Image (spheres, helix red, strand yellow):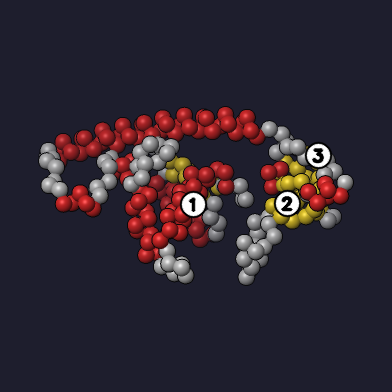
Amino acid sequence: MTHSVRHSTTGDVYSMTYIVRHSTLKVKKFQSTAFHPESERSIERSHLVLSEYLGHYVSEDQTDWDSWVPFVTYMYNKTQHSATRYTPFELLFGRPSTRPSALRQPPEPRYNYDDYASELKDRLRTAHQQAHKILIEIKGKSKEYYEKTAGRSKLKVGDKVLLFDETVRRGRSRKLSAQWLGPYTVTEIDKVNATIARGRKLVKVKVNRLKTNLIDGLKK
């Protein structure tokens, strides 16, 4: 069986390590597009949730965040996922997570090891099949919604636009840096791409990285 994984981290050492590991585990790696995390929505969303959890418990100086990571990951892994409708723990181990308070209760009777292993395989198989079916349905609905809302760009040749730029100079804070550069002039529109004039150079970028320069519109 071949699995797929997608990541956006760069670096020669990092990439070589993953190439060796993926070839051993028969995993096919996909590289995401720079400045376009849409293809990594699930992992980015999980990171956002973990950050929100940590934000509720860290101290004011935020120096103790690492001490809360085990508790935060435990809560995340035992919380039902809105897409799969299973907890990550249950999909991995084939059973619901046992809370620490449950240790005070008498243990549940078990059969022999063979019966338990067979039952565990059935639970894992059923959970994965149902979660996969639900994910396919949700992705189909997301695709339909995207196709309805995407549409064509409203930009026209000659428009003055601003370009979204996530690059940050060394020693500068991203929150304090200007993320919209420009204005630049649109010279060509091609479906999801646009060509802009940056000085003497013509640069092709995605239209979702552009927005109309409102100041220029007010002058008109």
Q: Are marks 3 and 2 in contact (CB under 8 Å)?
A: no
Residue 163 image label? 2
Q: How many marks?
A: 3
Q: Tag 3 or tag 1, which sits nearer the N-term?
A: 1
Residue 193 image label? none
Whole-percent x, y for residue 117 in the image: 20, 39
Whole-percent x, y for residue 64 in the image: 41, 67
* C-alpha separation, residue under disc 2 versus residue under disc 1: 25 Å
Residue 118 in the figure: left or right of residue 6: left
| Residue that numbered label 1 is attached to | 48
**109 or 17: nearer the viewer:** 109
**20 or 132: nearer the viewer:** 132
* C-alpha separation, residue under disc 3 versus residue under disc 2: 15 Å
Q: Are marks 2 and 1 in contact (CB under 8 Å)?
A: no
Whole-percent x, y for residue 70 in the image: 35, 58
| Residue that numbered label 3 is attached to | 156
Residue 68 in view here: yes
* C-alpha separation, residue under disc 1 versus residue under disc 3: 35 Å
Kindly state the secondary structure of the residue where label 2 is placed: strand
Residue 1 in the figure: left or right of residue 104: right
| Residue at 76 percent of width and 46 percent of height | 212
Residue 202 in view here: no
- Could you say which quadrant of the image residue 191 lies in? top right
| Residue at 54 percent of width and 33 percent of height | 142
| Residue at 65 percent of width and 34 percent of height | 150
| Residue at 65 percent of width and 56 percent of height | 166
Q: Amino acid at mark 1?
A: Leu
Q: Amino acid at mark 3?
A: Lys
Q: Amino acid at mark 2?
A: Leu
Kindly state the secondary structure of the residue where label 1 is placed: helix
